[in-house]
């Protein structure tokens, strides 16, 4: 309040103009008012940036909800934010070289960050999501977005770290959707960004969190766990509790990837007690981990409580992951919880985690799947067998046993239409995993031959709709297709030269 009082009494407004109206009236009551400013003031631009940035960040949160209603809301927020950034960008263009002197460095960085992020986000969204969120007529320009984020980082202003985090989100989180396809390209770039960022911000819990994600992509689970634990220990201020819960989730996932089921159950139990994100999903994951550790009676008790806890609504509907969990538990009930069909490995398949497993863990997982297939042969439904075959095929491809992996996945893909009654997600996911296997197997081929088989399978997967985790799989396929497009352009350039 003292600062505001001094600001007002000094005659300077927030927008950078000196208030001389009182003196003017005393000295010359009939004096002509000054002409309007040629450009927006620095304060006006800054205020617009703050508003646009809040809309942008809100839309990014909504995009993570994976529902049509959240995508619609995200689209509306993006539209409002984009229009504000567009107005500011047009104003900066009219300023020309004067922009660097008329607008402060931090505000310029905010414009670069916001407009760059919107372009990158829109360019990264698959057609299924773009039809919902970009109905307002905007499409993303990834090259333009990357250029603006680079400028944001170069300003060394207050949004420079946000620019680095945006790049890390693109290279690490997007690679997490398709690690076998994007990891080879994205991980080295992320390594470089992280090295520079951690050199400048050694205590940053955010950059340490991304270090943990990047190590997981490399299959270095121990290093990943150490990074998440350190990130959690650094997130000590009031809002840091949210980041600590996120690190707990990542640590629980790391334990599951390493088949440390008891430790995984402990982390998911902590998340249940903290009521973080979805209690129902974490209870389910905790029960699945307990079952995998040999404590099935405890797991069954937890499974039985789950249907009564599903109350979280978004846009009038239960969130997708809770729809999935509720359906699975009801299927378990039909067999008296006798045939739960390796729920931990099913989650890891859907979460695309097999690429982060060591060969030893993959081999142990394969043995579990084979034992379950033998146990349930002739007893389990076709749905259950299709899920097991998809898990097995994905594991075999990661082990380099491509012929066997392809046989498992093709068996699922070739099932007659309508044969799968409950697990509607399994056939498109089998197409995805078969494409991943083809990509790995054909990586040494030249030109189009490297991706022709994988692309055909991913195109087939795009044709399916109305299943759980549809948007998640769409992002994976879109990211893979972007990579194919980049490789195709590189191949054409090398041929031309």
Image (cartoon, rainbow, N blue to C red):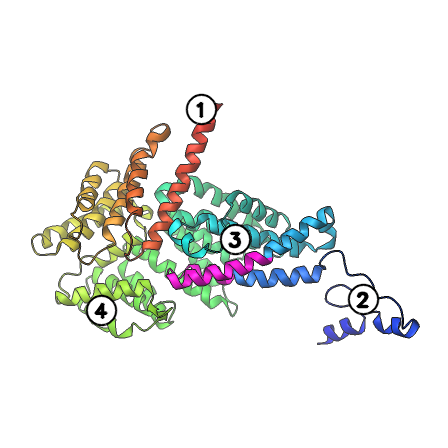
Q: Which residue is mark 2?
A: 18
Q: Which residues are magenta?
A: 57-84
x and y percentages locating residue 307 in the rendered image: 24, 72
Q: Secondary structure at mark 2?
A: loop
Left or right, 437 with respect to 33, comes to left
> Which residue is found at the position 50% from the left and 66% from the top?
236
> Which residue is found at the position 48% from the left and 55% from the top?
208
Q: Which residue is mark 1?
A: 495
Q: Which residue is mark 4?
A: 303
Left or right, 305 with respect to 86, comes to left
Q: Earlier in the sequence, mark 4 or mark 3?
A: 3
Above or below: residue 317 compared with residue 150: below
x and y percentages locating residue 90 in the rendered image: 65, 51
Q: Earlier in the sequence, mark 4 or mark 2?
A: 2
Closer to us: 195 or 190: 190
- Nearer mark to the viewer, of 4 and 3: 3
- Is 83 part of what is drawn in magenta? yes
x and y percentages locating residue 152 in the rendered image: 60, 50
Label 3 Cα neighbours within 10 Å, binned few <14 / some 14-19 / many ≥20: many
Q: CA distance from mark 1 to mark 3?
A: 34 Å
Left or right, 378 with respect to 177, comes to left
Q: CA distance from mark 4 to mark 2?
A: 67 Å
Q: Which residue is mark 3?
A: 118
């Amino acid at each position: 309040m003292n600062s505001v009082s001094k600001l007002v009494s000094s005659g300077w407004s927030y927008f950078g103009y000196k208030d001389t109206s009182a003196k003017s009236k005393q000295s010359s009551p009939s004096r002509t008012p000054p002409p309007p400013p040629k450009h927006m003031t620095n304060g006006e631009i800054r205020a617009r940036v703050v508003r646009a940035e809040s809309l942008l960040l809100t839309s990014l949160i909504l995009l993570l909800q994976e529902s049509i209603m959240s995508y619609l809301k995200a689209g509306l927020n993006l539209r409002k934010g984009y229009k504000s950034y567009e107005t500011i960008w047009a104003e900066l263009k009219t300023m020309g070289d004067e922009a660097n002197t008329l607008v402060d460095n931090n505000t310029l960085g905010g414009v670069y960050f916001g407009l760059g992020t919107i372009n990158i986000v829109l360019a990264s969204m698959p057609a299924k999501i773009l039809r919902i969120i970009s109905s307002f007529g905007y499409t993303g320009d990834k090259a333009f977005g990357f250029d603006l984020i680079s400028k944001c980082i170069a300003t060394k202003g207050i949004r420079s770290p946000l620019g680095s985090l945006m790049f890390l989100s693109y290279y690490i989180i997007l690679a997490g959707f398709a690690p076998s396809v994007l990891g080879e390209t994205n991980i080295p770039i992320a390594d470089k960004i992280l090295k520079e960022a951690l050199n400048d911000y050694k205590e940053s819990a955010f950059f340490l969190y991304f270090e943990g994600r990047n190590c997981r992509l490399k299959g270095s689970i121990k290093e990943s766990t150490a990074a998440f634990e350190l990130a959690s220990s650094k997130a000590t201020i009031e809002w840091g509790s949210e980041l600590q819960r996120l690190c707990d989730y990542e640590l629980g996932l790391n334990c599951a990837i390493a088949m440390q089921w008891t430790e995984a159950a402990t982390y998911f139990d902590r998340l249940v007690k903290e009521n973080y994100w979805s209690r129902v999903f974490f209870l389910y994951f905790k029960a699945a981990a307990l079952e995998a550790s040999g404590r099935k009676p405890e797991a069954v008790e937890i499974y039985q409580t789950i249907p009564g806890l599903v109350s979280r609504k978004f846009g009038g509907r239960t969130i997708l992951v809770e729809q999935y969990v509720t359906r699975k538990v009801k299927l378990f009930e039909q067999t008296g919880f006798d045939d739960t069909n390796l729920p931990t490995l099913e989650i890891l398949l859907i979460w695309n985690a097999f690429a982060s497993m060591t060969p030893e863990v993959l081999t142990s997982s394969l043995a579990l799947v084979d034992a379950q297939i033998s146990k349930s042969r002739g007893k389990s439904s076709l749905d259950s067998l299709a899920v097991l075959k998809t898990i097995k095929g994905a594991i075999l491809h990661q082990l380099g046993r491509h012929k066997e992996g392809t046989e498992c996945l093709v068996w699922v893909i070739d099932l007659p239409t309508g044969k799968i009654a409950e697990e509607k997600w399994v056939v498109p996911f089998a197409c995805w995993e078969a494409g991943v296997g083809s990509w790995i197997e054909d990586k040494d081929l030249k030109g189009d031959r490297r991706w022709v088989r994988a692309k055909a399978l991913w195109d087939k997967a795009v044709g399916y709709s109305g299943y759980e985790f549809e948007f998640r799989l769409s992002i994976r396929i879109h990211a893979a297709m972007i990579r194919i497009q980049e490789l195709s352009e590189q191949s054409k350039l090398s041929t031309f030269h």
